[in-house]
Amino acid sequence: MTGGCFSHTFCGFSVWRSICAVVSKTGNRINSGLYGIMSDATDNPVTVSPRSAWFAVLLLWIAYLINYVDRQTVFSIFPVFERELRLSSKELGLVGSVFAWIYALCMPLAGRCGDMFRRDRIVVASLGVWSLATLGTGLSRSFSSLLGWRAVMGVSEALYIPSALGLIAVLHTTSTRSRALALHGTAQFAGVVLGGWYGGWTAEHLGWRLGFAILAAAGLSYSFVLSKALPAAAPPRAKQSAAPSPFDILGSRCYLALFAAFFALCLMVWVLYGWLPDWIYEKYGLSMAASALSATIYLQAGSALGVLLGGVAADWLRKRVRPARFYVCAFGLFLCAPFGYLTLAADSLARLKIASGFFGLFGGFMIANIFASAYDVVRERNYAFAAGVLNLGGGIASGAGLLLAGWWKESGGVVTLMQRASIASVFAALLLASVAALRFDSDVARLSRSR
């Protein structure tokens, strides 16, 4: 088993390096032709007032809220898909997995684009296209059509997060970066709750197809607002010979340990995001709307609180302990892992709610600092690409969790799946803390030496 794991890990990193090479060569070839279109050929870095920097976070928060509402709504109406489209549990698992895997595979290229071109324009374009994909989802009449539109949504939503996070990181200095990224991240939790409730409510009262059309109209309208209000954000244009390679992020041991920890977290998170509404619906007999709300409100409220506390704590600790953000991530993952298992193993709805709330609270500490931690050990020019690769791993883990839960659900093994994922997460947290303690200073010094 150990040899097999190392073999798969080696193959995974080989694929990763191949993706990086293709992305780097492709980016270099198109950079000279498209840079002027996407960036207005400016070499000036982003300079805005603190108030404008926080206003940009608010604008992106709303976009990220729409992002998660659109992707999450489908999970609340699995019973409708089973009834109207005749989908099996395995097919429902694929509905979530196809999105997650396409989303993940597009991340390195999306991140590279965010480091080369106008990040604000990439964000606006992403919002417009995924809103059209949301409309297409509501028009689907078959399993293949539904999968196709979920794939389009995966591509379009992948463009958003690397550019949005890179823009926030440039607008906010080290002293406010964790808080800014944490505040933006709370939109994810609000979106999961709103999307979960909205999907179940519209399916029961308006019709799920009309519900998707309303979401698409809202997204397209806001993309116009965002195009006018978001500050211009062309990354500094480095000389071709001086531009850091995307391979540069592989030189940080802390970044690689963070990648492993994020993979473990996403596996647990998306088993709950994708299947907890259906789990409650079948086990406790609630309505679709009530099941979706119970599955999301406690978990997401805990997550939002954890993200805010984790962001403030990390910014404060960072002034005193340089690897503080990595330690906060490890702390959060270590403590949330057992509550992930207890959420599904609970013998009552009340205990499920309590466990999911604590899972969200401690998981939020890690979520608040994942990208801020990465930005401590990678160059600014690679901010978006570093976020993209992290999301590549997170997306693969998310798709695996959704698919495995669908397969194991038919044999009653979802609780066992979560138990194993929780154990793996504990080990990933210990690895992250150990690597940060031993290698953080050398990772930061490496950046200074090669400038």
Image (cartoon, helix red, strand yellow):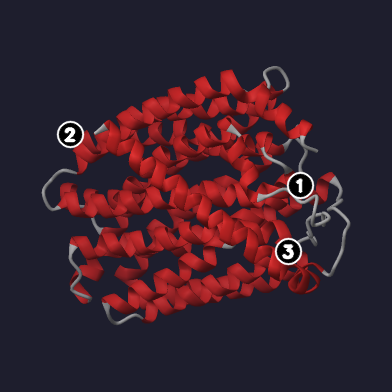
How many residues crowd around disc 3 within 10 Å: few (fewer than 14), some, or many (20 or more)? many
Q: Decide which of 99, 281 is in the foreground and name it.
A: 99
Q: How many marks?
A: 3
**Left or right: 243, with 362 as reference point:** right
Question: Which residue does the numbered mark 3 point to in the structure image?
Answer: 117
Who's the residue at 52% across and 36% down the image? 256
Can you tell which mark lies on residue 247? none
How many residues crowd around disc 1 within 10 Å: few (fewer than 14), some, or many (20 or more)? some
Where is residue 391? Give x, y as percent.
Answer: 51, 50
Say what amino acid the circle numbered 1 marks: Val
Mark 1 vs mark 3: which is more N-terminal?
Answer: 3
How many residues crowd around disc 2 within 10 Å: few (fewer than 14), some, or many (20 or more)? few
Q: Is residue 401 above or below residue 237?
A: above
Q: CA distance from mark 3 to mark 2?
A: 51 Å
> Which label sits in the foreground, 1 or 3?
3
Q: Residue furthest left?
A: 411
Who's the residue at 66% across and 68% down the image? 124
Q: Decide which of 68, 371 is in the foreground and name it.
A: 371
Q: CA distance from mark 1 to mark 3?
A: 14 Å
Q: Quadrant of residue 444?
A: top right
Mark 3 vs mark 2: which is more N-terminal?
Answer: 3
Q: Decide which of 255, 95 is in the foreground and name it.
A: 255
**Left or right: 40, with 16 as reference point:** right
Where is residue 346? Give x, y as percent.
Answer: 22, 34
